[in-house]
Image: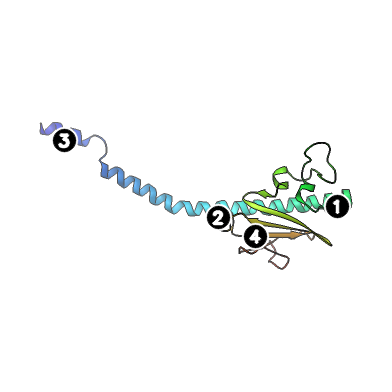
Amino acid sequence: MRKVRNRQRSRGFSLIELLIVIAIILVIIGIALPKFNVAQMSARELSVQQEIRTINTAEVQYQSQFGQFATTLAQLGPPTSGAPGPSAADLIPGSLAAGEKDQYLFVLTATPGGYTINANPKSYGSSGRRTFFSDQSMVVRSNFSADPANASSPEMR
């Protein structure tokens, strides 16, 4: 009888062993997850910088075609129907023309001498750690705070 019990015990894992393995896995996830979130935020910020450059390029094309800078992102975006024109030049993707991409909100504002672009995270700290700004000078600037970046913010390199 004793030999039968020993054989049953040696098969499989005990509950304690399984709990220890689960605890080790949770510790590893707890260490890796914050680093993954930071990497994801950094990738999102790089994407936003590229989107701002795309808008700058589209503004130059729009100004070349129509003699003025676009005053809204919709003017740079695709038309809802028909051919492209001044109200929808089809120079940027529709997702960007909607004003929200990569968990950032994009705002294009007309100024007397051109335009400004601001890109701010939807949720500062979790969507992104930086705000971005650019204008007709095509220089991208960023701010490491929740305050929107502006013309006096540090230039991106």
- Up-down relation of residue 148 to residue 31 (above or below): below
Q: CA distance from mark 1 to mark 2?
A: 36 Å
Sequence-first tag of 1 and 4: 1
Q: CA distance from mark 3 to mark 1?
A: 84 Å
Taking depth in this image into account, of 31 and 93 the one nearest to the observer is 93
At label 2, the amino acid type is Ser
Looking at the image, is mark 3 or mark 1 nearer the viewer? 1
Dot 4 surroundings within 10 Å: few (below 14), some, or many (20 or more)?
many
Looking at the image, residue 47 sits to the left or right of residue 4; the answer is right
Q: Which residue is mark 3?
A: 6
Sequence-first tag of 3 and 1: 3
Taking depth in this image into account, of 153 and 79 the one nearest to the observer is 79
Q: Secondary structure at mark 1?
A: helix
Q: Whole-percent x and y of residue 97?
A: 73, 47
Q: Whole-percent x and y of residue 31?
A: 43, 54
At label 3, the amino acid type is Asn
Q: Which residue is mark 4?
A: 131
Looking at the image, is mark 2 or mark 3 nearer the viewer? 2
Dot 3 surroundings within 10 Å: few (below 14), some, or many (20 or more)?
few
Q: Work out which quarter of the rendered image holds the C terminus and state it.
A: bottom right
Q: How is the image coloured?
A: rainbow
Sequence-first tag of 2 and 3: 3
Sequence-first tag of 4 and 3: 3
Q: Whole-percent x and y of residue 43?
A: 60, 51
Q: CA distance from mark 2 to mark 3?
A: 53 Å
Q: Residue at x 47, y 51 (%)?
A: 33
Instruction: Return the mark for residue 126.
Output: 2
